[in-house]
């Protein structure tokens, strides 16, 4: 099975790479194909962990991985090492009771939570309170 993963560096203020965001890609072209987000993340995880090896792919740095509402509610991130995984909640994840309960479990287990392409509104306040990192989409803000 062929699989493609984009590895986007995350820099600190000194321009040193401190982590990588892993992104599913459907081929050599650098874009997300028309595929369900949960299926894309599942393929990314199986490739990163079983085919390539996460340490080799991440150069022993933390990885940031996008998770859909479905995968958050199923608590899939709990399968990953908390020391080296940042759980990114996609912008369309709604703060339902199931999502908030799962996020509390992640936080209690020591995971880092990031809100991806975040736009604040009244409903997102509980997620803001739990988030360690908020990535703001300046084009939308």
Image (cartoon, helix red, strand yellow):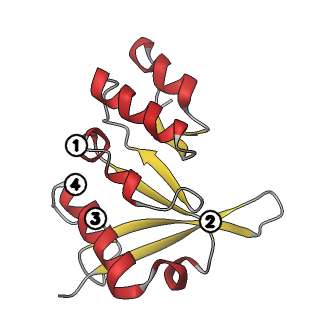
Residue under circle 4?
38
Upstream in the sequence, badge 3 or badge 2? 2
Q: Residue at x 52, y 43 (%)?
A: 109
Q: Which of 128 and 110 is in front in this view?
A: 110
Q: How many residues crowd mark 1 within 10 Å: few (<14), some (14–19), many (20+)? A: some
Dot 3 lies on which element? Answer: loop
The quarter of the picture where residue 69 lies is top left
Q: Mark 3 points at which residue?
A: 32
Q: Residue at x 44, y 83 (%)?
A: 53
Dot 1 or dot 3, earlier in sequence: 3
Label 3 packing within 10 angstroms: few (<14), some (14-19), many (20+): some
The residue sitting at 31% across, 36% down in the picture is 92
Neighbours of disc 4 within 10 Å: few (<14), some (14-19), many (20+): some
Give how far apart the Cα atoms at labels 1 and 3 are. 18 Å
Residue that mark 1 sits on: 70
Label 3 or label 2, whichever lies nearer to me, is 2
Residue 21 horizontal side relative to residue 62, left or right? left
Closest to the observer, 32 or 122: 122
| Tag 1 and tag 4, C-beta contact below 8 Å | yes
Instruction: Examine the rendering and report whether any part of residue 138 can be seen.
Output: no
Residue 19 lies, with reference to residue 76, above or below; the image says below
Q: In which quarter of the image is residue 28?
A: bottom left
């Amino acid at each position: 099975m062929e699989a493609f993963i984009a590895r986007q560096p995350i820099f600190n203020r000194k321009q040193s790479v401190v982590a990588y965001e892993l992104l599913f890609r459907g081929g050599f072209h650098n874009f997300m194909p028309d595929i369900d987000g949960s299926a894309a993340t599942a393929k990314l995880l199986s490739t990163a962990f079983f085919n390539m090896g996460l340490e080799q792919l991440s150069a022993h740095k933390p990885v940031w991985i996008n998770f859909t509402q479905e995968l958050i509610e199923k608590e899939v991130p709990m399968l990953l090492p908390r020391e080296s995984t940042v759980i990114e909640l996609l912008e369309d994840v709604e703060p339902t009771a199931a999502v908030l309960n799962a996020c509390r479990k992640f936080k209690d287990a020591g995971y880092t939570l990031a809100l991806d392409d975040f736009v604040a509104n009244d409903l997102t306040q509980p997620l803001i309170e739990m988030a360690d990192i908020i990535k703001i989409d300046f084009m939308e803000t």
